[in-house]
Image: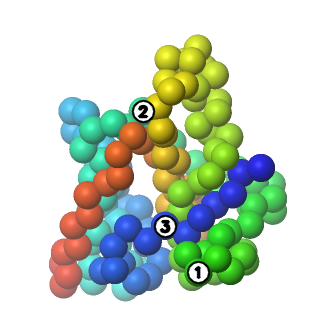
Amino acid sequence: MEQWKQWIPSTKLNAFLYVSRIEILGKELKLTCEYENLSTLIILRFKSGVLAYRDTYETALLQRFEDITIEKADSEVEKVKNWNLFVVVDSQYVQEFKKETLGAYSNLNITHYIISSDDAVTEILSLQPPSIEVLDGKA
């Protein structure tokens, strides 16, 4: 069964993020994110190893949200509240990807990253974690 685990990629990140822009730059996937108050930009750069990504409006995933539980970093299980960065264990997306590629990636360790905001869910399948850049006071 799919399980979302709280992902804390940096101690500099401390609030709910919103994806404001998705760019493909050669082999790099760049996500520009910001906090609700728009005072800080966070750049997540998947520099290589991105196998797939999708961005879906939240209303298209209502059943999925009913079915998931979240494992917080401190192992306490609860529904999504004030955090929205996750990695998925036993990911259906990874399983579907491996099936669709006829096993070409079956021996690789693929991580399923999720950024779930109020109106969209951005999912990335990658072989490597992203680099993170925090730009305070962008306004």
Task: Tell whether label 1 touches label 2 (CB within 8 Å).
Answer: no
How many residues crowd mark 3 within 10 Å: few (<14), some (14–19), many (20+)?
Answer: some
Q: Nearer the viewer, residue 90 or 31?
A: 90
| Residue found at x 35% / y 45% | 128
Image quarter hosting the C terminus: bottom left
Q: Which residue is mark 1?
A: 74
The extreme top residue here reads 102
Tag 1 or tag 2, which sits nearer the N-term?
A: 2
Q: Which mark is residue 51?
A: 2
Task: Tell whether label 1 touches label 3 (CB within 8 Å).
Answer: no
Q: Nearer the viewer, mark 2 or mark 1?
A: 1
Q: Mark 2 and mark 1: span between their CA atoms?
A: 30 Å
User: Where is 84 relative to 27, above or below?
Assistant: below
Element under label 3?
Answer: loop
Q: Which residue is mark 3?
A: 7
Dividing the picture into quadrants, the one containing residue 130 is bottom left
User: Where is 82 relative to 89, above or below?
Assistant: below
Q: Can residue 108 be seen at all in this image of the molecule?
A: yes
Q: Can residue 38 be seen at all in this image of the molecule?
A: no
Q: Nearer the viewer, residue 27 or 32?
A: 27
| Residue found at x 44% / y 82% | 15
**Along the horizontal axis of the image, is 30 left or right of 120?**
left
| Residue found at x 59% / y 64% | 5
How many residues crowd mark 1 within 10 Å: few (<14), some (14–19), many (20+)?
Answer: few
Position of residue 26 measured from the top left corner of the image (x, y, whole percent): 21, 33
Position of residue 37 measured from the top left corner of the image (x, y, whole percent): 37, 85
Tag 2 or tag 3, which sits nearer the N-term?
A: 3
Q: Nearer the viewer, mark 3 or mark 2?
A: 3
Position of residue 29 measured from the top left corner of the image (x, y, whole percent): 31, 44
